[in-house]
Image (cartoon, rainbow, N blue to C red):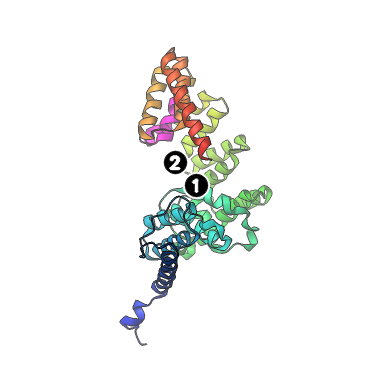
Amino acid sequence: MTRAGPFQAFFSERFFSCFLRSALLALVVASAALAQQTPAGFDYIELSPEGSAAAAQAIALRGLCEFETGNFHQSLADLQQSLALGATQDAGSAMLIRLREAQLLTRLGRFEEALDVYGSLAKAGPPNQRSPEWNIGVGLAGLRSSQLPADVPVGQQILFAMAGDAALRFMSGDQAGAKQVFSNLFQRFPESANAHYLYGSLLSPTDPDAAIVEYKQELAVAPTNVTVAAMLARVLLYQAQPAQALPFAQRAASEDPESPLAQLVLGRSLAETGDFSAGIEHLQKALELQPGYLETHIALAGAYASAGRPQDARRERLQSLEMAETYRAQQ
């Protein structure tokens, strides 16, 4: 068998794909430069917030090329910038950009953000019209595995594909179909970490009681899962059950004292069961770990008020209102 020479190896499939995108990018940038009388070059694009369609596509092409070459952080930054500049105007390009964005968020361990992107894409078509890459990608985010679909070993693909299929069905509004696929998933992979957590997180906004059941089942599989313990405590707090939330919050904070969510739910659980001093201490710790988080400021306002500290409570309420107004203005 003849080995590939240096020239053949150089023009591998991945490199050639990136090469073509770079060539297209150069053409787009050059056209934009001629039209706008701006300096041309791979990194020249310095535009007003409105941007131009050519610039948005150029940045998107650069981001797609960076994805292929493994420059994941810069790829994500460029793809998100292209979306902000209007790359979504072309439906086909927007779908690919958002899909790559979700995959990159997963690869970088930002699983909740990735699921938010997949959720916004879930109505693009019925599940049987999506590629296996979709299902595996959603499954990776849902099961909290920092991989790209192309890197998943063959023996694990069915696990992530089933999890992704179930999640996509739920996101698309097919809750009955999702329930069946999740049931099949649990039967086939009973020890799979984060499977019950994924289903619980999807159920939580509309069926918190069912979410609590799933979170408890997840803890039976993975007792040291900090995220699940914290989320279970959070749902119980939303259900006005702070005493039931407290042991799960304590477990989460004990396993990971640097988790902002664990400190938040422990602070709330303590304050809402009457231990105001300890509760305030943990809520302040949560703010140190995650400054400017609205839910923590609201919880602190309530804890200060209950502890007889009206001035501190007023300060936190005012700050919460300001943050809420800023958030509303950005939507």
| Residue 89, image quadrant | bottom right
Give the extent of the magenta segment. Answer: 251-267
Q: Is residue 160 magenta?
A: no
Residue ID at (48%, 47%): 113
Question: Secondary structure of the magenta portion, mostly?
Answer: helix
Q: Nearer the viewer, residue 323 or 239?
A: 323
Which numbered disc flags the more N-terminal residue, 1 or 2?
1
Q: Is residue 121 above or below residue 262?
A: below
Query: Which residue is drawn at the image coordinates 43% and 30% (left, top)?
Result: 264
**Placement of 137 over or under 271, stated as above or below:** below
Task: Tell me which residue sits at (41%, 65%) in the image.
Answer: 33
Q: Position of residue 172 (x, y in %)?
A: 64, 51
Q: Is residue 166 above or below residue 263?
A: below
State if disc 2 and disc 1 touch (CB < 8 Å): yes
Q: Which residue is mark 1?
A: 194
Label 1: which secondary element: loop
In the orientation shown, which residue stands out farthest toward the left? 6
Query: What amino acid type should be assigned to the residue bearing mark 2?
Result: Asn
Quarter in which the N terminus is drawn:
bottom left
Residue at the location (51% across, 61% down)?
157
Foreground: 41 or 219? 41
- The residue under label 2 is 225
Residue at the extreme front: 37
Q: Position of residue 267 (x, y in %)?
A: 43, 25
Q: How many marks?
A: 2
Drawn side of residue 48 relative to residue 237, left or right: left
Q: Amino acid at mark 1?
A: Asn
Residue 108 appears in view: yes
Q: Is residue 257 a member of the stretch shown in magenta?
A: yes
- x and y percentages locating residue 249 in the rendered image: 45, 30
Residue 185's label in the rendered image is none
